[in-house]
Amino acid sequence: MTLLLLFLNFCQFGLLCFGGGYMLIPLLTAAFVGDGKLLTTERFGNLVSVSQLTPGPVGINTATFVGYISGGFRGALAATLGLVFPTLLLAGIAMRFIIKYRDNRVMKEVLYGARLGAAALVMYAVLIFMELSLFAERWEIFTDLPLFSPGAVLIMVTSFILIKKFKWQTTWVILLSGVLGAILIPFLG
């Protein structure tokens, strides 16, 4: 992939990525993940997991990594700049309109609709993460039905409880989840 094409792809993602990096997950999956594409499903899952541990937004970390795989340092720079450029440009323009028309009924409805679309992308990203993480294998008889990995379910439920009930920082939860994965997954699948 040429540097210009990489830049333009990530410009497109930057235009569509309102609401944060998790909105980027479905777009990246469609563009770069799968048979004959840049990343395997497993490698993409690992990429997103590692990007949670490193400083910075998941979208920037992912763009930088995908760019680096595709074109080295220059690819990383092209992808990162491509992702950020439209956001900076559009955010400046959008803020002028939002501030000027913030009490306008149509503006409120547009923003409400945009939040619903963003929520749908986040939910889709959740489904992608579940497919990457929770399913160990498929039933022998019914090949279309996934089989949950007990270890993965245990780690996910434990992580959710630590974040929601005990207010743990996400970095510690992800680190603990990695340790638990190394311990539990070989035995529980």
Image (spheres, rainbow, N blue to C red):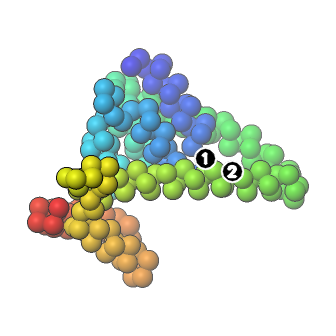
Residue 143 appears in the figure: yes
Comparing labels 1 and 2, the label whose residue is closer to the camera: 2
| Mark linked to residue 114 | 2
Do residues under tags 1 and 2 come within 8 Å of each other at their CB atoms?
yes
Residue 27 position, x and y percent, is 49, 39
Label 2's element? helix
Name the side, left or right, on which 155 lies relative to 92: left
Depth check: give the residue in front, 91 or 138: 138
Residue that carries the numbered disc 1 in the rendered image? 18
Residue, x 27% and y 72% (percent of image)? 154
Quadrant location of the C terminus in the rendered image: bottom left
Residue 71 position, x and y percent, is 34, 24
Depth check: give the residue in front, 102 or 109: 109
Residue, x 33% and y 34% (percent of image)? 34
132 above or below 14? below
Decide: few, some or many residues near mark 2? Use Cα within 10 Å; few <14, some 14-19, many ≥20.
some
Decide: few, some or many residues near mark 1? Use Cα within 10 Å; few <14, some 14-19, many ≥20.
some
Residue 23 position, x and y percent, is 52, 48
Q: Looking at the image, tell me whether mark 1 or mark 2 is earlier in sequence order.
A: 1
Give the residue type at disc 1: Phe
Residue, x 27% and y 52% (percent of image)? 142
Direction bottom: furthest residue:
165
Distance CA(mark 1)–CA(mark 2)? 8 Å
Direction right: furthest residue:
104
108 above or below 163? above
Name the side, left or right, on which 143 lies relative to 6: left
Residue, x 43% and y 54% (percent of image)? 127
Give the residue type at disc 2: Ala
Kindly indicate the quadrant of the structure image that contains residue 177.
Answer: bottom left
Label 1's element? loop
